[in-house]
Amino acid sequence: MGNGVTYGQKLPLKELGDEQWQKKYAEISLLGLMLREQGISFVEFPINEDTEAEIVYETAKTFSNEGVSVSLHPYLHKELAPEIFDQNRYDDLERLLTIVHQTGEITGAPVPCVFHGGLANMKPHMVPEQKALLCAKTFFAAIDSLTALKYSNVIPFCETQTPWSASSKGALRLGDTYKGCLELIEGTSIGICWDFGHTFRASYLKKHDLYPDEHFLARVKHVHAHDTILLGDQHEDHFPLGTGIVPWKEYCAELARHEYNDTVLLEVPVDRFSNLEDLLHSVRRSVEMLNNLF
Ligand SMILES: [Zn+2]
């Protein structure tokens, strides 16, 4: 049991320093301590092109002091949007990877870093699909070579995105199927972040099969674990495991068959819980359930 899998919790970087937020949940070091006691080894923060490095570093240091390391999840829609990436943007990419690298220097641990595949025919850049795909592939190739050359403590992933719609024409999130995600990282050594809720939605919309093939499973190195509830014909994601319709136990069994021993993030926003006790209870329960599957 366990098999070396380590568990993380998604946290809202900006809110963590907010007094009201801390009153409702906990101040940062106490939160780190309490999460660690529930079996959490790392916390994952969303960042973007405008995130101030100092906030990331300070927060990472506080968690690190409690024995909790950090992963980062860049949401890039401005100058680093994958669908507009080209060689003129290497410097911007390096600036971002430097922040990720420095974070790892502070925590003394590798930093999992989850990237998305970009958008086609969507705002703000409105790039046609073929062009967007080419740029996104250049984006991942650049990340692959930069991390190999200069930032060895940065562990990059490409996440399975949630489909924009059932259609494969018009507005698209790239990498919204098992195959699409593999295509983005073809020729690189970048691993996959398997988002359980996203791929379930893609199979619900008949964009791909319910379960991935062996090629996909062999590349998974990070997981975003959460459940999906169905409201009418609308999906709502990012609920605690066991409260919805995602076959997450079967997904974990597929990974266990591949002797999965990497990281699993509980991607449930803290504001799904009304207080610290409910959050910690849910975290502990999820870690226990997952540990029984690996
Ligand atoms: Zn995710």
Image (cartoon, rainbow, N blue to C red):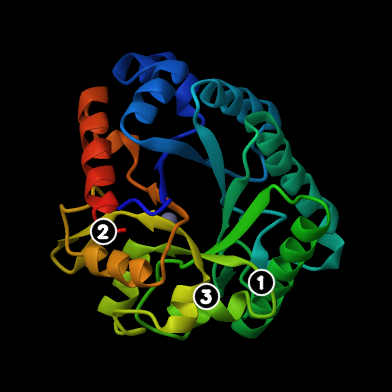
Circle nearer the N terminus (3, 2): 3
Q: Is residue 66 left or right of residue 232?
A: right
What kind of residue is marked 3? Cys
Seen at 33% across and 13% down, the residue is 23
- Tell me the crowding category of disc 1: few under 14, some 14 to 19, or many 20 or more residues within 10 angstroms, Cα based: many
Q: Quadrant of ligand 1?
A: bottom left
Circle nearer the N terminus (2, 1): 1
Task: Please indicate, yes or no, whether residue 173 appears anywhere in the rendered image.
Answer: no
The residue pinned by badge 2 equals 293
Seen at 42% across and 13% down, the residue is 19
Task: Please indicate, yes or no, whether residue 109 appears anywhere in the rendered image.
Answer: yes
The disc placed on residue 136 is: 1
Circle nearer the N terminus (3, 1): 1
| C-alpha span from label 3 to label 2 | 25 Å
Given contact means CB atoms under 8 Å apart, are the residues at marks 3 and 1 in contact?
Answer: no
Q: Is residue 261 left or right of residue 54?
A: left
Picture coordinates of residue 225 (x, y %)? Answer: 34, 55
Q: Quadrant of residue 8?
A: top left
Ligand 1 within 8 Å, label 3 CB = no
Q: Secondary structure at mark 1?
A: helix
Given contact means CB atoms under 8 Å apart, are the residues at marks 3 and 2 in contact?
Answer: no
Q: Secondary structure at mark 2?
A: loop
The residue pinned by badge 3 equals 181
Nearest the camera: 87 or 256? 256
